[in-house]
Image: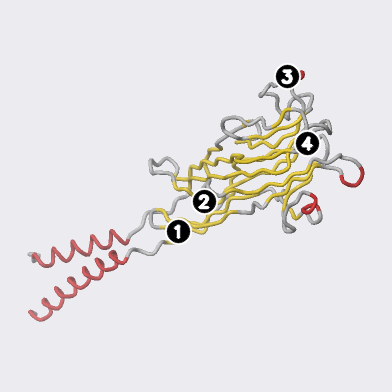
Amino acid sequence: MKVSKTTRIAAAVLMLASTAVAQAEPVSDWYFTVTMTWTDWNFTDGGGLQANIPVDRSYITWGASENGGMDASYHAYAPDRSRSGLYFFATRNSQGNPATGFAKTDETTATNMLVHYNNAILSSFKTLTDAKFSVSVQVRERDSSDAMITLVDPSQKFNVWFLETLNQGANQGDIFATDFADITGTFDYNGYTYSYTFGDIGNTLNPLGSDCARVGAPASCNGFVTPENNDTILQFGLKITNVTPAVPEPETYAMLLAGLAVVGSVARRKARRS
């Protein structure tokens, strides 16, 4: 059977348009990298060793120095626990940045954690009053070589207000307050739109009520109180979900309609000839 040139062209245009409209399967596995860093910090007046900030700015500490020296490796989780501090961990046993790993669509995946070590220190030492931190979240399809997609830009900073208490009477425990809240948004990838949430997945941040005023934070602040000689873990996590097909570009629809128009024209010509 002979096929006319017009018919072949129509079929080619229709096939090209259909291919453009067709979409890949939605992504089920992602690779992520999350970096959390301290950007600013202030202390009360006093002595001791403060602001033990490493190159990756993953922690702030204050309190006694090792054997009276200025050892920058002397951490708040040291055995004698004579320092306090706020640490970002990639995992519980891996201090520093960034946290990397794999996440599945529609599942919550733990990323970084913030650990507050509250240890007894001398009242004459400087203690933290406030700080700021930034968050960077990037993802790409697992095992792909595509460029990373930025979900959370590190240019945004979050405030922390802090009070080192005397750990006596009714006001026991150091107070950590913040204006950080879950970060949400959407992004498009490979013909689909995804939503994401990055935030506190352990429900550690809760309204502090009157303690907000004690640390100088807004009345609506959230946070936690860590008792003396205890630690508080604030676990962060990422969830990518709500997969919906992205709307094709107008040019794609135009190509499809053009293909259908050519096919319709060919069909009408054949009808007239018969």
What whole-number distance in Å separates the C-alpha atoms at marks 1 and 4? 43 Å
Mark 1, secondary structure of its residue:
strand
- Amino acid on which the number 4 mark rests in the picture: Asn
Residue in the image at 78% along x and 54% along y: 213
The answer to whether mark 2 and mark 4 are in CB contact below 8 A is no
Crowd rating for badge 2 (residues with CA inside 10 Å; few <14, some 14–19, many 20+): many
Q: In terms of sequence position, does the residue under pointer 2 or pointer 1 come before the other?
A: 2
Q: Which mark is residue 209?
A: none
- Amino acid on which the number 1 mark rests in the picture: Thr
* Residue picked out by circle 2: 105
| Residue 260 sits above or below residue 56 on the image | below
* Residue picked out by circle 3: 69
Compare residues 159 and 231 and report the one nearer the observer. Answer: 159
* Residue picked out by circle 4: 118
Of badges 2 and 4, the one in the foreground is 4
- Amino acid on which the number 3 mark rests in the picture: Gly
- Amino acid on which the number 2 mark rests in the picture: Thr
What whole-number distance in Å separates the C-alpha atoms at marks 2 and 4? 36 Å
